Image (tube, rainbow, N blue to C red):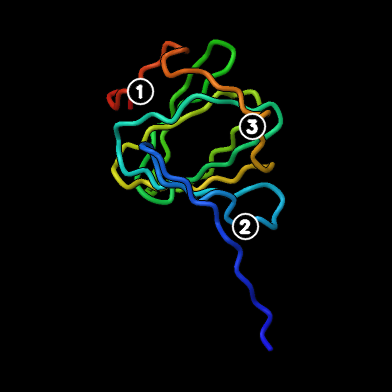
Amino acid sequence: MMNYSFDKIHFNMDDRAERYLNVFSNIEGQINISYVKSTNHIVAWHKHEKQTDYWVCVKGSFKVGLSQDEKTDFIYLTEKEPRVLKIPPGIYHGYKALEPESIMLYYLSDKYDPEDEHRAKVGDFGESWNRENK
């Protein structure tokens, strides 16, 4: 007899993205996938005190904001230049898709803990999310 099984994947959808959450529930940390249909939404800002995030764009492109100690940087993740962005604790971060149907894969060093997520509002850091910043 073959010994295989299925684990249910949590699916979440809102006006910003469709997400598979905690894809492999039996690993340390958490893997999520966000499918972002629109370029109109900004998914920002939050930071963690314990958790480290690792982001990779697997389709399309993203403008990523990073902010700490009154300094804000923007970087770009794209499928055409594959790389993994490591975001350590203490850095506010967020993103905006630059192409419809962009996909972000992200690994979290710890399972989601709402107590470890600290939010700020878009505009709190005097930033501009316009595409022209590229």
Name the residue beneath numbered marker 1: 129
Where 96 falls versus 6 (above or below)?
Answer: above
What's the residue at 32%, 44% (across, down)?
37
Q: Position of residue 89 (x, y in %)?
A: 66, 28
Q: For marks 3 and 1, give the one nearer the viewer.
A: 3
Q: Spatial distance from mark 2 to mark 3, Cα to Cα? A: 19 Å
Q: Badge 3, how many Cα within 10 Å: few under 14, some, many 20+?
A: few
Q: Residue at x 59, y 26 (%)?
A: 47
Of the image marks 2 and 3, the number of the one nearer the N terminus: 2
Residue 98 falls in which quadrant of the image?
top left
* Label 2 secondary element: loop
The three-letter amino acid code for the residue at tag 1 is Trp
How many labels, in total? 3
73 vs 98: above or below: above
Q: Which residue is mark 3?
A: 114
Q: Is residue 68 above or below residue 59?
A: above
> Would residue 44 appear left or right of 133 to someone viewing this image?
right
Going from N to C along the chain, the mark reached first, 2 or 1, is 2
Query: What's the residue type where badge 2 is placed?
Result: Phe
- In what element is the residue under mark 3? helix
Q: Which residue is mark 2?
A: 24
Q: Can you tell which quarter of the image residue 61 is in?
A: top left
